[in-house]
Amino acid sequence: MPTGRTPEPGSLSRHVANLLAVEIARRGLRQTDVAAQVGMSASQLSRVLAAKKVFTIDQLDAVCRAVGIPIGQVVVMPGRRRWPGSGAVDIAVSKAPQDDRGADECDG
């Protein structure tokens, strides 16, 4: 049952937000253009990239596509468990909090 609480960004969310923010800047893209392309408001994307909000998996996928970077390239953190057969690539698996509603619309 929804509690109305917004999930706090954890280390994986902060890591992903930082990687995407750096990549957007490196590619000379404007956050407002990326946001418009993926159907997010510019302020919503800005809050997620500042690790003040958490991406939904669909938002993350859409932003990665708009930026031109594979989602698997940003959801990687050194020091996490290795995916079998993935070679030298470390991966991180995120588990949503039990009370996470899975979206941040109307969360202020």
Image (cartoon, rainbow, N blue to C red):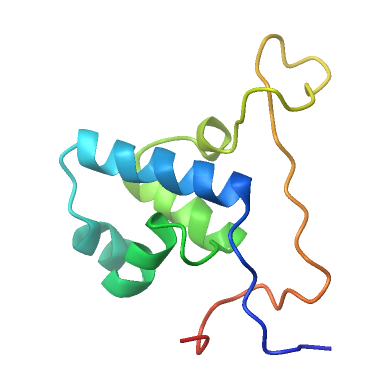
Residue 26 in the image: state x and y as whole percent: 22, 33
Return the residue found at the far top: 87
* Residue name at image x 34 percent, y 49 percent: 66
Q: Position of residue 44 (x, y in %)?
A: 37, 72
Q: Is residue 41 left or right of residue 70?
A: left
Q: Nearer the viewer, residue 31 or 47?
A: 47
- Could you say where residue 74 lies in the image, as x and y percent from the top left? 51, 36
Q: From the viewer's perspective, is 75 left or right of 87?
A: left
- Vertical placement of residue 10 versus 2, above or below: above
- In this view, the residue in front, 99 or 103, is 99
**Which residue is found at the position 73% from the left and 27% from the top?**
80
Total numbered labels placed on residues in the image: 0
Q: Quadrant of residue 95?
A: bottom right
Q: Is residue 82 above or below residue 1?
A: above
Measured as percent of width and height from the top left, residue 103 is found at 60, 76
Residue 84: image quadrant is top right
* Quadrant of the drawing holding the N terminus: bottom right
Q: Compared to 107, does 57 lie above or below?
A: above
Write the residue at 56% across / 51% down.
13
